[in-house]
C-alpha cells in the first residue's frame, strides 16, 4: 500500500478536467464546530452508500484532528476520483506516472507542532482514488469504509506537517492515526499489516 503526499505543490489544487459535469457532484460537509470539507465526487465510480457513510463520519474525525493540533475550524478540499484521474494528477504535480491511493497537497508549510490558527483557513487538498482503495481493502481483508477513513486521516495529517520519512516520524504519525481511528471504532490499521509508504 502506498501513501504519498507532496509538500512542494503550491496552488496545485487538482481539477477534475477529465470528467464531465454530470459525472462529478460537489458538496460541502460541515462539522459540528464549523469545519468544512469541500468534496468533489466522481459518482460513476464511488458508490452512494460508501460516500454517505464517509460523509457522516469524516466531519467528526476532521474535528478530532483539528482538536489534536489545537487548531480552530478550518476547511479542506477533498477529491474522490478514479484511478485514471489520480494517475493524471500524480503525473502533472509529482512527475510520477502511476496511480496511488491518496495524495495530499498542503496549502502551505506547517510544522507538526505549531501555534493555533486564529481563523478558518484552507489547509489544502486531499485526493483519493476509488479502485485503488477498494483493491487495497480487499487485499488487507478490511472494510472499504475503514480503509477510506484511514486514507483520509493519513492525508489530513500530512496537511498538518506530519510525515513518515524516518522511523521516528513514521511511528509518531502511525500512533496518531491509530488513536484517531480508534475514537470512531476502527481497528489499528498497522497491527499485523505491512503498509508501504512512498513519499
Image (cartoon, rainbow, N blue to C red):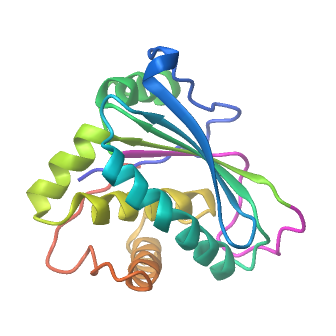
Answer with the quarter of the image where residue 54 lies: bottom left
Compared across the picture, whether 122 is left or right of 100 comes to right
Q: Residue at x 60, y 42 (%)?
A: 27
Compared across the picture, whether 29 is left or right of 169 comes to right
Q: Nearer the viewer, residue 80 or 125?
A: 80
Compared across the picture, whether 109 is left or right of 146 comes to right
Q: Is residue 3 in sight in this rendering?
A: no
Q: Is residue 107 magenta?
A: yes
Q: Position of residue 60 (x, y in %)?
A: 56, 72
The residue segment tinted magenta is: 102-119
Name of the residue lying farthest toward the right = 118
In this rendering, is residue 75 above or below 82? below
Q: Position of residue 57 (x, y in %)?
A: 47, 68
Answer with the quarter of the image where residue 82 lies: top left
Q: Residue at x 48, y 47 (%)?
A: 5
Q: Position of residue 64 (x, y in %)?
A: 59, 78
Q: Residue at x 24, y 58 (%)?
A: 144
Q: Nearer the viewer, residue 107 or 137?
A: 137
In this rendering, is residue 163 above or below 124? below
Q: Position of residue 24 (x, y in %)?
A: 48, 27
Q: Is residue 136 magenta?
A: no
Amino acid at each position: 500500500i502506498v501513501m504519498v503526499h507532496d509538500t512542494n505543490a503550491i496552488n496545485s489544487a487538482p481539477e477534475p478536467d477529465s470528467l464531465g459535469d454530470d459525472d462529478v457532484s460537489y458538496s460541502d460537509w460541515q462539522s459540528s464546530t464549523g469545519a468544512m470539507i469541500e468534496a468533489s465526487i466522481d459518482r460513476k465510480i464511488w458508490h452512494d452508500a460508501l460516500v454517505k457513510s464517509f460523509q457522516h463520519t469524516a466531519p467528526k474525525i476532521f474535528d478530532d484532528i483539528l482538536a489534536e493540533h489545537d487548531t480552530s475550524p478550518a476547511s479542506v478540499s477533498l477529491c474522490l476520483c478514479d484511478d485514471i484521474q489520480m494517475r493524471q494528477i500524480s503525473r502533472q504535480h509529482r512527475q510520477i506516472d502511476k496511480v496511488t491511493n491518496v495524495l495530499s497537497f498542503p496549502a502551505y508549510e506547517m510544522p507538526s507542532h505549531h501555534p493555533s490558527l486564529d481563523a478558518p483557513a484552507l489547509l489544502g487538498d486531499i485526493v483519493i482514488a476509488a479502485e485503488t482503495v477498494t483493491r487495497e481493502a480487499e487485499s488487507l481483508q478490511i472494510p472499504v469504509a475503514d480503509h477510506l477513513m484511514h486514507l483520509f486521516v493519513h492525508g489530513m495529517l500530512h496537511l498538518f506537517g506530519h510525515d513518515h520519512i524516518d522511523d521516528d516520524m513514521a511511528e509518531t504519525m502511525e500512533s496518531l492515526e491509530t488513536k484517531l481511528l480508534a475514537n470512531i471504532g476502527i481497528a489499528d490499521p498497522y497491527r499485523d499489516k505491512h503498509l508501504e509508504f512512498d513519499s
